[in-house]
Amino acid sequence: MATNYATVTWDQLHRDARTLSSALMARAPFKGIVAVTRGGLIPAAIIARELDCRLVESISVISYSGESAEDQKEPRVVKAPVAAGDGEGFLIIDDLVDSGETAKIVRDVLPKAHFACLYAKPNGKPHTDQYVMEVAQDTWVLFPWDTAPLFVPPLARNLG
Ligand SMILES: O=P(O)(O)OC[C@H]1O[C@H](OP(=O)(O)OP(=O)(O)O)[C@H](O)[C@@H]1O
Ligand SMILES: Nc1nc2[nH]cnc2c(=O)[nH]1
Ligand SMILES: [Mg+2]
């Protein structure tokens, strides 16, 4: 299990996706964007809007079955990004790189594309061309689609 959790709110995610979009403008225009499903779908939608990019393809990769690094499986591509060819002129977007295994397999499929993500853990950093924020390796990022607000009892109720 991860030692720590980092909760990302919708607002924060939108801000970080816009920050990444600003940085990516230096390389625009792209022929299209390839979202790495599922985590890359919402960041890719925000970035496609900011870069005014209408061609959005996807690559579907399955690599985790639960909420920790121990739940990692051998990544499997279950849908290819046919519209992106070898990736030339394309931008790949994922939510984060952790071990970097997903990014490696995606880059094998699209060797000429530029890979960008919102968050990068140290082991994943060598496998992304660009990211917004580094997160510690022992921290599990909780995305807004992973969480829901819960009632928390007042501190005073726990006294006595
Ligand atoms: O660098 P790695 O160790 O490979 O981990 C990063 C990948 O793990 C998560 O996807 P996941 O396989 O959980 O699927 P999902 O995007 O469908 O939730 C995340 O969205 C990245 O794609
Ligand atoms: N939600 C989530 N998925 C992941 N897949 C690999 N690492 C992570 C992480 O920290 N958070
Ligand atoms: Mg993913």
Image (cartoon, grey):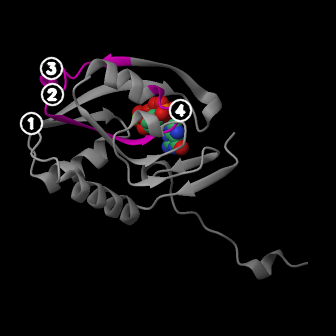
Q: Can you tell which of label 2 and label 3 is closer to the viewer? A: 2
- Is residue 147 depicted above or below 158 in this figure? above
Tell me the distance, in whole angstroms, between the alpha carbons under discs 3 and 1.
Answer: 11 Å
Q: Crowding at label 2, few (<14), some or many (≥20) Cα neighbours within 10 Å?
A: some
**Among the two numbered marks 3 and 4 on one chain, the one whose residue lies closer to the N terminus:** 3
Label 4 beta carbon less than 8 Å to ligand 1: yes
* Disc 1 target residue: 31
Q: Is residue 153 left or right of residue 142?
A: right
For label 4, count other residues whose C-alpha is less than 10 Å away and answer few (under 14), some (14-19) or many (20+).
Answer: some
Tell me the quarter of the picture where residue 60 sits.
Answer: top left
Left or right of 145 on screen, residue 159: right
The residue segment tinted magenta is 77-101
Give yes or no for residue 98 being in the magenta stretch.
yes
Kind of element beneath mark 3: loop
- How far apart marks 4 and 1 lie (CA) works out to 28 Å
Sort mark 3 into few (<14), some (14-19) or many (20+) by Cα contacts within 10 Å. some
Q: Which residue is mark 2?
A: 88
Is the C-beta separation of discs 2 and 3 under 8 Å?
yes
Q: Nearer the viewer, mark 2 or mark 1?
A: 2
| Mark 2: amino acid | Glu
The residue under label 3 is: 85
- Which of 46 and 125 lies nearest the eye of the viewer? 125
User: Which residue matches tag 4?
Assistant: 99
